[in-house]
Amino acid sequence: MEGIVVVEKVGGKSKATRCFSKYPLKFIVPSKVASSKTDAVWIYSISYGGGIVSVYKSVGSKCSEQFLEKQIFRVASDSSLVIVDWLTSGRHESGEKWDFELYKSTNNIFLDGNEPLFLDSVLLEQGSSTSIADRMQDYQVIAMVILVGPKLKHVQNQVQEDVKKMMTKRFYAPASPCGTKIESEYGLPKPALIASCSVFGPKDLGVVVRISAVTTESVYEFLRHHLASMESLLGASPYCRT
């Protein structure tokens, strides 16, 4: 799949000035998602048929699938960007769990033209000794949220604080009599959702949140909660229930 969207300031407001895509990818740029007073462009990307499946090949009597995705973002130093990129294991209720040969998702962000700001690739590949399903254990979803820009500083600070509190609570038991903490590998239940945060870029311009979860609903809840404060910027709350 291939496509490009360009958003620029026109008459003092953000506007999609270029929107191009090749089948099976399609971009939809609705005009009435938010109030006309909101300076934001909503863009939906959809795909037909195979989604991001780009390669099928026969290996003996077995069909091998490879999923390849690459997204490139170019932002100005004073612009803001949110990227949500996630993947489920498949129709796991029907027994389909990480049943593919290769998945690779690349997200690159460049600042003010060609200065690398964030270069990231997620790779899942079947191994000769262990499968993807074995390595993922009970986790059926992986996700990444990238928050970049000055207008999102309050969201960045809040999500870092929330993730720190959440994971400290889930991974550590109360202190033992000798003062040490017992981690989950010593008997605590495995968390249904694991998240981590790290900053990147000059002056900590961006924050990346990585998530592994047992269910898709828990990821939706995470996104609904932590992106709800963006309603004032977008004119509507992303991932809200309708």
Image: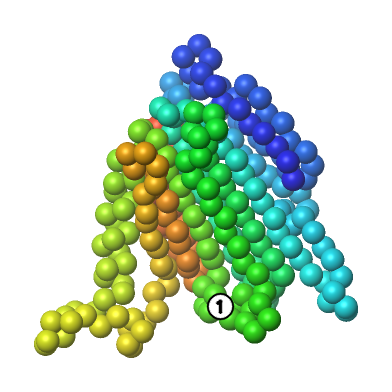
Rendered image coloring scheme? rainbow
Spot occupied by residue 4 in the image (x, y as percentages of width and height): 67, 34
Crowding around mark 1 (Cα neighbors within 10 Å: few <14, some 14 to 19, many 20+) is: few
Q: Would you name the residue on which mark 1 appears?
A: 135
Residue 198 visible somewhere in the drawing? yes
Spot occupied by residue 217 in the image (x, y as percentages of width and height): 49, 62
**Helix, strand or loop for disc 1:** helix
Instruction: Locate residue 236 relative to residue 25 in the image: left or right.
Output: left
- Amino acid at circle 1: Arg
- Residue sitting farthest toward the front: 115
Task: Name the residue at 74% across, 57% down.
Answer: 53
Q: Quadrant of the N terminus?
A: top right
Q: Is residue 216 above or below residue 34?
A: below
Residue 239 visible somewhere in the drawing? no
Spot occupied by residue 119 in the image (x, y as percentages of width and height): 53, 48
Task: Name the residue at 47% across, 66% down.
Answer: 212
Residue 79 lies in what quarter of the image?
top left
Task: Name the residue at 49% across, 28% down.
Answer: 112
Residue 3 lies in what quarter of the image?
top right
Q: Is residue 35 above or below residue 171?
A: above
Q: Is residue 91 above or below residue 25?
A: below
Residue 229 lies in what quarter of the image?
top left
The answer to which of 242 and 51 lies nearer the viewer is 51
Instruction: Locate residue 222 relative to residue 18 in the image: left or right.
Output: left
- Residue sitting farthest toward the top: 11
Spot occupied by residue 126 in the image (x, y as percentages of width and height): 67, 74
The answer to which of 159 and 37 lies nearer the viewer is 159
Q: Is residue 89 above or below residue 232?
A: below
Give the tally of numbered discs: 1
Task: Name the residue at 72% across, 53% down.
Answer: 51
